[in-house]
Image (cartoon, rainbow, N blue to C red):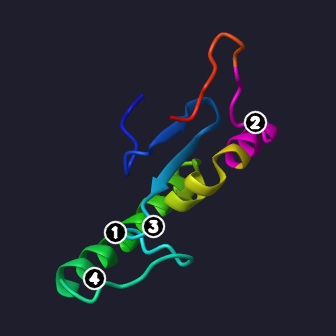
Amino acid sequence: MEKLPGNPDIVFVNRKIAVFVDGCFWHKCPQCYIELKSNRGYCLKKIDKNVKRDKKINELLKKTGWKVIRLREHQLKENFNETFEAWKRNSLIHISTKHVLKPC
């Protein structure tokens, strides 16, 4: 498989689903982002660049028939089991009885 734009964290090739796990701070999570009081110039520039790049990557992937899922860091920290179960319910993943995933 050729490299996808944005280097997704998880790829479901057969279903053409690209999953990104974005850090809440660096990708400006609307739920938990808080601007820094120091080093603002560098951080705000980098965050703005990340947000624009994310949008561009989403558009590129969607144009080629990929579904894009963007999870926020806090979603996995707070709701790993619920997120995982939702993926199973929606048939995004199939769990083999040979391989059991356990959180660290």
Foreground label between 4 and 3: 3
Q: CA distance from mark 1 to mark 2?
A: 30 Å
CB-based contact (under 8 Å), mark 2 and mark 4 = no
Q: Is residue 90 magenta?
A: yes
Percent coordinates x, y for residue 87 in the rendering? 72, 41
Instruction: Find disc 4 in the rendering and name its residue.
Output: 44
Q: Earlier in the sequence, mark 4 or mark 3?
A: 3
- Image quarter where the N terminus lies is top left
Q: Is residue 104 above or below residue 7?
A: above
Q: Earlier in the sequence, mark 1 or mark 4?
A: 4
Q: Of the numbered discs in the image, which one, if any, rests on residue 24?
A: 3
Callout 3 environment at 10 Å: few (<14), some (14 to 19), or many (20+)?
Answer: some
Q: Earlier in the sequence, mark 3 or mark 1?
A: 3
Foreground label between 1 and 4: 4
Q: Earlier in the sequence, mark 2 or mark 3?
A: 3
> The residue tagged with tag 1: helix, strand or loop?
helix
- The residue lying at 66 percent from left, 10 percent from top is 98
Q: Earlier in the sequence, mark 2 or mark 4?
A: 4
Percent coordinates x, y for residue 35 in the rendering? 36, 85
Q: Does residue 67 appear to the left or right of 44 in the view shown? A: right
Q: CA distance from mark 2 to mark 4?
A: 37 Å
- The residue lying at 53 percent from left, 56 percent from top is 63
Q: CA distance from mark 4 to mark 3?
A: 14 Å
Instruction: Find disc 2 in the rendering and name its residue.
Output: 88
Foreground label between 2 and 3: 3
Q: Amino acid at mark 4?
A: Leu
Instruction: Find disc 1 in the rendering and name its residue.
Output: 50
Percent coordinates x, y for residue 8 in the rendering? 44, 45
